Structures are given as structure tokens and as C-alpha cells.
Amino acid sequence: MRARIGDRLVVESERHDMHRRTGVVTEVRGDNGAPPYQVRWLDEDKDHEVLVYPGPDAHIEEGPVGGDTGRSGT
């Protein structure tokens, strides 16, 4: 798995009581785009970020050119 700042990390859920989660990669801590990633989940407080080691249920969706992290005015 490889990501860049601004890409979206999508975590699918196989459980019917859990929902799909999407977050924006705000920092790549591994070498050459490898995990772990600092991620801001889109369904949570915009100032709350977490360090994520994605599992097999996760994939990367390419973000906008220029690495937009979805923050406005910061």
C-alpha cells in the first residue's frame, strides 16, 4: 500500500453493524509512501487525527493533485 498526503484511506467493514470509514492522509510516516499514516477521519472532529496502520480491509483512493487535506484556512 502506498499513499501521498491528500489521498483518502478507505476502511471497509465486513460487519453489518459497522460502517465504511474514510479519512484523509495528512502525513506519511513510512518510506516511499508506506504506512503508517496520520489520518483525519471525515466523520469526526476535523482537528482530530490518528496514526493508522491499515489492515487488509483498507485501500487508498488517490486524492486531488497538490495534496489537499480538506482543511480550509489552515
Image (spheres, rainbow, N blue to C red):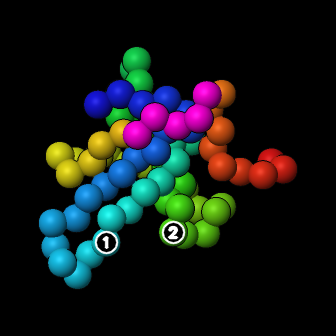
Question: From the image, which quarter does the N terminus lie in?
Answer: top left
Answer with mark 1 or mark 2, whichever residue precedes in sequence: 1
Most distant residue in the right direction: 73
Residue 63 among those drawn in magenta: yes
Give the labeled residue for mark 1.
Answer: 19
Q: Name the kind of residue labelled 1 in the image.
A: His
Q: What mark, if any, has residue 28 been given in the picture?
A: none
Measured as percent of width and height from the top left, residue 66 is found at 65, 27
| Snapshot quadrant of residue 34 | top left
Percent position of residue 41, x then y: 50, 59
Q: Inspect the magenta stretch and tell me whether residue 24 lies in it.
A: no
| In this rendering, position of residue 51 left or right of residue 13 | right
Q: Residues within 10 Å of mark 1 (few under 14, many from 20)?
A: few
Question: Residue, x 66% and y 61% (percent of image)?
Answer: 47
Disc 1, SS: loop
Residue that lies at the very extreme toward the top in this rendered image: 32
Where is residue 64? Give x, y as percent. 59, 35
Looking at the image, is 52 positioned above or below residue 6? Answer: below
Residue 31 picture location, percent across and down: 39, 20
Residue drawn 61% across the image and 69% down it: 45
> Marks 1/2: CA distance?
11 Å
Hey, which residue is sitting farthest bottom in the picture? Answer: 17
Residue extent of the magenta highlight: 61-65
The residue that mark 2 highlights is 43
Q: Is residue 66 found left or right of 13 in the rendered image?
A: right
**Residue 39 sits above or below residue 28 on the image:** below
Q: Is 43 rendered above or below residue 52?
A: below
Label 2: element kind: loop
**Is residue 53 shown to the viewer in this render?**
yes
Residue at x-position 15% and y-position 66%: 14
